[in-house]
Image (cartoon, rainbow, N blue to C red):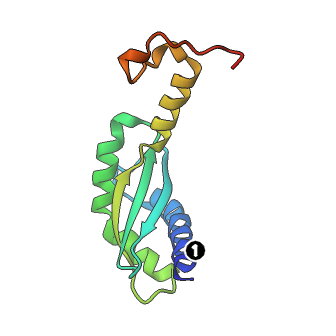
Amino acid sequence: MASNRIGRINEEIQRELSSLIPNVKDPRVSGMISVTAVDTTPDLRYAKVYISVLDKSDCAQVLKGLKSASGFLRRELGHSLQLRYTPELTFVRDDSIDKGAHILEMLRNPQVVKPANPENEHIHLDEEG
């Protein structure tokens, strides 16, 4: 039951942060920034916010800017959420999109995939099965 509540709170925090981040005045926090997930501790004191940035070269600067603006974002979250405690925000880069693209590329090009065991190099995968 409690995990269901935390799941709803995670979704609400994600939705609120997605609308609050464009209002951050820090010039480092610019470009296409997406909140991909939020993971809150069971006591609702801490929340890890997963961020995806379109321009990968600016990711470190965006994370520094978000860390700098975390007080503002936490205060605004406190105004919009009806919780006893507003969680302390920690921003983390989300690599899942990059990893998914890499796996998709490996699936498209099977010759790129090397066998894990050198003894199995003689095994070739057929299209038919």
Q: What secondary structure is found at the residue carrying circle 1?
A: helix
Where does the C terminus fall, quadrant-wise? top right
The image shows residue 39 at horizontal and vertical percentages of 44, 65
Relative side of 91 to 54, left or right: left
Quarter of the rendering containing residue 70: bottom left
Label total for image: 1
* 72 or 37, nearer to the observer: 37
Which residue does the image show at 49% across and 55% down from the upper left? 35
Q: Residues within 10 Å of mark 1 (few under 14, many from 20)?
A: few
Q: Amino acid at mark 1?
A: Arg
The residue at which mark 1 appears reads as 8
Which residue does the image show at 50% across and 54% down from the upper left? 36
The image shows residue 42 at horizontal and vertical percentages of 41, 78
The image shows residue 93 at horizontal and vertical percentages of 37, 48
Is 92 situated above or below 118? below
* 102 or 61, nearer to the observer: 102
Which residue does the image show at 34% across and 48% down from the upper left? 62
* 38 or 57, nearer to the observer: 38
The image shows residue 99 at horizontal and vertical percentages of 46, 36
Quarter of the rendering containing residue 53: top left
